[in-house]
């Protein structure tokens, strides 16, 4: 374990860099020129317009009001000020619940830390085993950790008792949080305005019929089997069409020509039955009817006429709507095998690429680099860094690779893809970051070790090295956690890109809006990494309580920053109504069980057999707790209760008895390519983004509206 | 491994005893006096009346028609003759599908055995490793098994290839069988006459309401939330009532008095709201309405208003209808823990009882036994057998104990109890009979070994001793399988009890009908034991193909016997429509995976690493196959498709447009105690059965009708 001084130095450096980022943010955000980088959400909502429109030229770019500099930390209380109901309305339930995860971290770890410092730290400190053993180099941190207890010490009972207390406290907080989130979700669903997906069910695997088109078949089936409730349907279309329009040229006229061609093509696709895929969005007269259809089995063959709640229109992942049952199961098998190999053997291709990435070979392929690389000093530097860079690139690409895997698995909504990818990423991080750091070695070596070790040896080996890795993880939390979060709020990349675009490309207000990159909370990328902190906190709560303050600082900072970001920056691509919570909850339970098993393993190496047995009920209780919560709360995230549907239907009828639902739902579920409105503009701008160096000469920049 | 001669002798003895049983059966069954023992089902159906009514006294008891003795094996083709649709109508789908499991055994193992004898036996036989190694004692059977191959032999590839062939063949048969059973189930459900459970949903955990009784609350809830479909409901009643009537005395008058008292009590219970439990059977106007309600979530709190398809009225397990959600999950936790201890530590209480069951102690408690026990020769014999007898008694009681555990778990139907108990029993048999026989030692010692061994060592240890245990399992199959099945058809216990009852108790035809004990297919007892043969067959198919013929004989004999029994003897207590098939299928997959892992373990000890790797995809494929089958077929056993419900509703309306469904369903779901019809008679007879030595003097025996 590293010395206290090492940790102190590391902490100092990281605090410095974090504070640096925060200061930079505090100054940059109040400059008018950066307004669109730090408040894009308000622009997109249309409630904020460029401060650059007013005042003199200098003030357009730089904030000269020095009083604001004094209040530069204002953003922190401001981020906390918005009450939760308003936050839900402003940023959506997904985001509001997401930031609650950080708050949950505080709720779990602050009391645990207080208790651990009040009980376990004194117990460890006064034990004095390390002091008495001569010739052993130890440090002050070790004296505070479980390492200071001698083998077979009676004091382990304190740790066992605390382990129970911590577990029950975590149960309590988790149960309460699940309950709150469930209530929030149900209230959110109940309070929502009328939305197409409330009346609509996604039907997949419509079986082929020799006499009828897909559309006719769907209509007949539901008109018969949901006689009193069926309203209308929209069939999906293949995401393919003949001639891809990929070169809209510089001139308005040509654009118009091509758009016409594309339009014809689109018409052809709509009318050609071969492009119709065997999936449909079926709408019902009442939410009750839709709730019934989504939750029931339609025919005796459960692989056709599959029904589920339709995702929000913008949440639909169109490419996966029409995968047949057998193909789907083959795809899942392939992805499962591929994911296994990725997790345990990813070092092999990395190593191969690293060995190939020899500078001499690169020079052969790209001879013009020769003069630069040939300089000896530079060469050795690059040669030294290259392997690390290749690994880093892989790790940055990893979430994208996992997302591609999830897409192959065939999930039909973006939110589903996010959740499945998060699960994969969590497993990867658990194996390669957590276990990989505790027992040094690649995942494959671990796997090999594990299958050659006895079942009770594995937790012993991992558990035994846990206390020794505390210093490493403290540094990890500071580098990845503290500085990472501080960098998040600064948005350096978005800042730079916005100013480059602004300087070279932006001609109209619309261009400027496109240049803003508000980003979004990428659940599949953020949540698994944040789960790692829960895991570390729970594992070290009993072993080395000194780690807890680091975790608490992380959660506080992250809560503040992400609350600020979802208020001012991020826009979400979809709203799933916090459907990810069961996953979050389950991963927390996994972290809890891992922590219990590792403590068991650690204690069993300390000649404290009796106390080890006393810990055995904990994992059993945790698994049981998981099932209780699952039974109690999970259905609210999967099904939609009929009573609630009935209430909403009744209210709907009372409020708007003349509503023409068929008209309202018409066109709600149409592939984005076929949505008419704004289509020319979108294509033009998309093209512009793809070829950013081509200056467009469209008239629009002249006569664009001044305000956004 | 035992010698060929040992096996031969054992086989001879077992064949002799099996043939003896079968001969005894063939002779006994054609004696008129035994007619009610061997054909009770036909009596209960009312299609057969006592042959004793006709002819002279001698012929009433003994069959003197010697021509029938010549055709004494007639029952075998007769058992096979009834075509399956008729069998389903006669014995129910549960029984018809149950005997298909034996047929499935033949379908799987006959081709596998042919292939194994054609390919693997020659490969093993010609290998000659055992012959070449001096000083090694071996036997002919070993020469036919995998043991004859030397370490690192190339011939292992033949076994690996066969393992793939056997696996894919099993996949094919299992998939096909699952498909057939699913079709049978759906056709059965579609062809059934109108039944109350088709229109009825069981609602549990009705939340308390301060202003309304349970009954009113149920009515209001469903009248609102299933407005167009709700018809009526019956609320359950506590299975308790004030004064238990447990001593109906000898005199008719007294019986009548008590019956009146009981009747009043019954009335009181029905009218007292405190006895109403928060569960109800809710009926709908259409099957479509019931199907919808059974498959959907009713309110936002998923622990109240739980709905599921109502079991058949006779399948309801009344005692468990009203267990609150939290209590239910606590019960499940307790049972899970208790079952774990029962499986791994059952030897501890047995050993304690065995040590307590000392003859001297018994004599102290029961001094009148002293003269018998004191004889020395007898004493030592008893002392020697006592521990074995205690273990045997425990094993006989085991299914009952497991059934009690399942009842505590709170399942609401008898069929559900049967299925859950079968799962527990299978696990127990797998751990204690299969693993316990392979690696000698108690389950606890195994558990201890396993957690101290590395993950890849366990299959090695088990796999390595598999070939050595082939002879043991051959004997096991002959003793437990062959003779057991032959004893099943003889029904010795039922025969003896019937004749005792007949001689001392039976006064009326009704008494005689009560004395018949047709028995039933106890799924929870039979199926797990039969699964053991699938496990043995699959494990030894590659390792020691010599075992397969024993398995095939077992399956043929069992198929014949059980088909005969379900036609002539057993009556079922309920009809679940083969709902047990997903469990049967899953246990077969487990057996397949176990066989693959053990082969992997065995080969990895034979210095054939490469070939071991070649086996790794098999378990992955098997798990995948399981999920494919589950997705494809399982819903048909859990849900009821809306399309089918709609078809049945339409037919129903066409056939019987004037049906008063409310009248039809009235009283369908009433606790058996409150069913009026026949209640006096049933109680009297029950009492008689409980106190069989008390001769009743009821008039009825005089004026009972002559025919049944």
Image: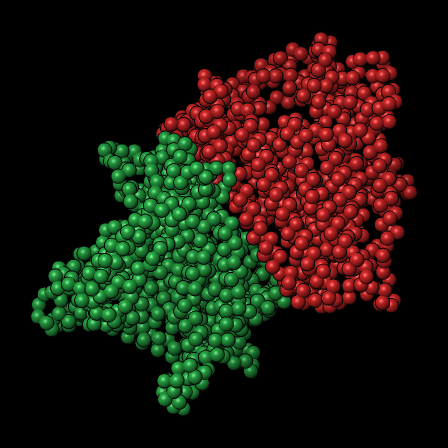
Chain colours: A red, B green
Tell me if B600 is positioned left or right of B382 in this view: right
Instruction: Classify A369 as above or below B443.
Output: above
Please identify the residue farthest to the top as the structure is shown.
A703
Q: Position of residue B428 (x, y in %)?
A: 47, 64
Q: Residue at x 31, y 70 (%)?
A: B487
Instruction: Classify B281 as above or below A27.
Output: below
Q: Position of residue A577 (x, y in %)?
A: 58, 33
Q: Residue at x 30, y 43 (%)?
A: B196
The answer to whether one can see residue A425 in this image is yes
Which quadrant is home to the C terminus of chain B? bottom left
Tell me if B57 is positioned left or right of B492 in this view: left
Q: Residue at x 65, y 10 (%)?
A: A253
| Front residue of this view, candidates B475 and B549 | B475
Instruction: Classify B550 as above or below B187.
Output: below
Please identify the residue farthest to the left as the structure is shown.
B56
Q: Quadrant of residue A603?
A: bottom right
Q: Residue at x 82, y 64 (%)?
A: A128
Q: Position of residue A558 (x, y in %)?
A: 74, 38
| Front residue of this view, candidates B674 and A43 | B674
The answer to whether one can see residue B185 in this image is no
Please identify the residue farthest to the bottom as the structure is shown.
B376
């Amino acid at each position: 374990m590293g010395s206290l001084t090492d940790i102190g130095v590391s902490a100092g450096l990281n605090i410095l860099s974090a504070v640096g980022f925060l200061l930079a943010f505090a100054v940059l955000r109040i400059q008018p020129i950066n307004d669109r980088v730090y408040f894009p959400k308000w622009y997109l909502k249309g409630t904020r317009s460029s401060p650059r429109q007013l005042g003199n030229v200098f003030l357009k770019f730089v904030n000269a009001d020095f009083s604001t500099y004094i209040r530069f930390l204002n953003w922190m209380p401001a981020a906390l000020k918005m009450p939760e109901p308003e936050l839900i309305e402003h940023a959506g339930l997904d985001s509001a619940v997401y930031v609650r995860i950080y708050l949950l971290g505080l709720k779990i770890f602050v009391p645990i830390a207080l208790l651990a410092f009040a009980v376990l730290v004194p117990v460890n400190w006064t034990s004095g085993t390390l002091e008495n053993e001569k010739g052993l180099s130890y440090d002050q941190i070790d004296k505070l950790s479980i390492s200071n207890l001698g083998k077979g010490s009676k004091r382990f009972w304190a740790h066992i008792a605390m382990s129970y207390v911590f577990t029950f406290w975590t149960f309590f907080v988790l149960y309460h949080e699940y309950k709150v989130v469930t209530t929030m979700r149900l209230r959110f669903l109940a309070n929502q305005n009328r939305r197409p997906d409330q009346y609509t069910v996604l039907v997949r695997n419509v079986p082929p019929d020799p006499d009828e088109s897909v559309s006719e078949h769907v209509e007949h089936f539901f008109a018969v089997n949901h006689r009193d409730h069926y309203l209308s349907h929209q069939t999906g279309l293949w995401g393919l069409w003949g001639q891809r329009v990929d070169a809209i040229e510089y001139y308005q006229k040509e654009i118009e020509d091509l758009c016409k061609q594309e339009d014809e093509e689109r018409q052809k696709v709509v009318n050609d039955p071969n492009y119709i895929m065997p999936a449909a969005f079926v709408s019902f007269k009442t939410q009750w009817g839709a709730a019934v259809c989504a939750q029931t089995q339609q025919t005796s063959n459960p692989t056709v006429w599959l029904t589920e709640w339709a995702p929000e229109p913008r949440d639909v992942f169109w490419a996966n709507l029409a995968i047949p049952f057998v193909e789907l199961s083959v795809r899942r098998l392939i992805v499962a095998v591929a994911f296994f190999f990725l997790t345990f053997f990813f070092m092999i291709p990395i190593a191969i690429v690293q060995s190939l990435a020899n500078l001499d070979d690169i020079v052969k392929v790209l001879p013009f680099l020769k003069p630069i690389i040939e300089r000896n000093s530079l060469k050795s530097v690059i040669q030294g860094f290259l392997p690390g860079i290749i690994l880093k690139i892989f790790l940055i690409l990893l979430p994208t690779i996992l997302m591609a895997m999830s897409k192959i698995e065939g999930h039909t909504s973006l939110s589903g893809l996010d959740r499945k990818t998060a699960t994969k990423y969590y497993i990867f991080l658990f194996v390669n970051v957590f276990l990989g750091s505790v027992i040094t070695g690649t995942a494959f070596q671990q796997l090999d070790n594990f299958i050659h070790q006895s079942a009770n040896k594995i937790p012993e080996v991992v558990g035994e090295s846990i206390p020794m890795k505390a210093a490493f993880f403290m540094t990890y939390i500071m580098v990845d956690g503290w500085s990472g979060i501080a960098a998040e709020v600064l948005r350096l990349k978005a800042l730079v890109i916005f100013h480059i675009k602004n300087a070279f490309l932006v001609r109209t207000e619309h261009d400027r809006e496109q240049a803003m990159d508000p980003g979004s909370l990428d659940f599949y990328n953020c949540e698994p990494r944040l789960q790692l902190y829960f895991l570390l906190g729970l594992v070290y709560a009993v072993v080395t309580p000194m780690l807890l303050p680091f975790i608490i600082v992380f959660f506080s900072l992250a809560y503040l920053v992400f609350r600020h970001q979802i208020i001012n920056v991020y826009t979400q691509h979809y709203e799933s109504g916090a459907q990810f919570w069961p996953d979050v909850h389950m991963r927390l339970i996994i972290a809890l069980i891992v922590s219990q098993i590792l403590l068991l393993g650690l204690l069993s190496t300390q000649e404290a057999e009796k106390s080890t047995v006393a810990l055995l009920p904990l994992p059993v209780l945790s698994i049981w707790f998981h099932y209780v919560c699952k039974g109690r709360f999970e259905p609210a995230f999967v099904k939609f209760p009929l009573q609630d549907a009935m209430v909403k239907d009744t209210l709907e009828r009372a409020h708007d008895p003349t509503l023409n639902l068929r008209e309202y739902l018409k066109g709600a579920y149409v592939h984005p390519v076929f949505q008419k409105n704004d289509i020319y503009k979108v294509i033009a701008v998309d093209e512009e983004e793809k070829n950013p160096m081509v200056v467009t000469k469209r008239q629009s920049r002249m006569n664009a509206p001044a305000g956004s």
